[in-house]
Image: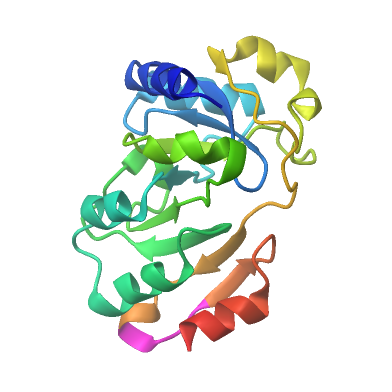
Amino acid sequence: MTPEDVETFERCISVGGVAIFPADTVYGLATEPDSREGVDRLYRLKGRPADKPAAVMFFQLELALEGLPELGERTRAVLDALLPGPVTLLLPNPARRFPLACGPEPDRIGIRVPVLEGPLAPLASVRWPVLQSSANLAGEPEARRLRDVAPEIRAGADLVLDGGELPGAPSTVVDLSAWESEGAFEVVREGAFPVDAVVRSLR
């Protein structure tokens, strides 16, 4: 991954293009979160149901906190504890930001801030949030190598970035919708981030 790759990625996203990119877990698909055309194309490439929410990925924790200023103090503390990391957090979204990512639940949003180290470190300079989903056909296994991405997805994307072989486990999904008000959370999907580590962080 080079600075030139990052510039190309940002240009692609800025015009509503769809990119395949490496994250800290698996290969993902990304587009401009407010581009209806880009989001529709991404969903068609995956064969993903139109009413299924996606996540918004920020490449720096500070940008996530700036982009969601209405988050409460307790919730922001959890973001500091868990992110960056291989985890997707479902958060209250009272301002209904990034509605195309939220599907039928505009009051809740999923966010990611990946750990980008080693060969992927240049991606940490990206300042553009993206709507992202794993780069696999709906219901099929996630891709840990670029060659694992379905040929039709690779052919349909505007940009393909090769980050080598990735860990391969998807992010752990944690629902923090009730954390601010009730101190309650739910692990919706266990993945790359162990559940006991989530519990320790929330304590």
Residue 20 visible in the displayed image = yes
Residue pictured at 24% horizontal, 60% vertical: 94
* Magenta part of the chain: 181-185
State left or right for residue 161 relative to residue 194: left
**Is the residue 133 above or below the residue 113 in the image?**
above
**Is the residue 147 above or below the residue 96 in the image?**
above
State left or right for residue 162 relative to residue 200: right
- Asked if the stretch drawn in magenta spans residue 182, the answer is yes
Residue pictured at 68% horizontal, 60% vertical: 192
**Is the residue 139 above or below the residue 3 in the image?**
below
Residue 103 visible in the displayed image = no
Q: Where is residue 109 in the image (x, y as percent from the top left)?
A: 39, 54
- Asked if the stretch drawn in magenta spans residue 108, the answer is no
Q: Position of residue 153 (x, y in %)?
A: 67, 19
Q: Nearer the viewer, residue 103 or 31?
A: 31
State left or right for residue 23 relative to residue 154: left
Q: In which quarter of the image is the N terminus?
A: top right
State left or right for residue 32 relative to residue 116: left
**Is the residue 155 above or below the residue 188 in the image?**
above
Residue pictured at 61% horizontal, 47% vertical: 24
Please say which color scheme the image uses.
Answer: rainbow
Q: Where is residue 88 in the image (x, y as percent from the top left)?
A: 52, 58
Q: Which of 166 and 48 is in front in this view?
A: 166
Q: Give the prevailing secondary structure in the magenta stretch.
A: loop
Total label count?
0
Q: Position of residue 201 (x, y in %)?
A: 50, 80
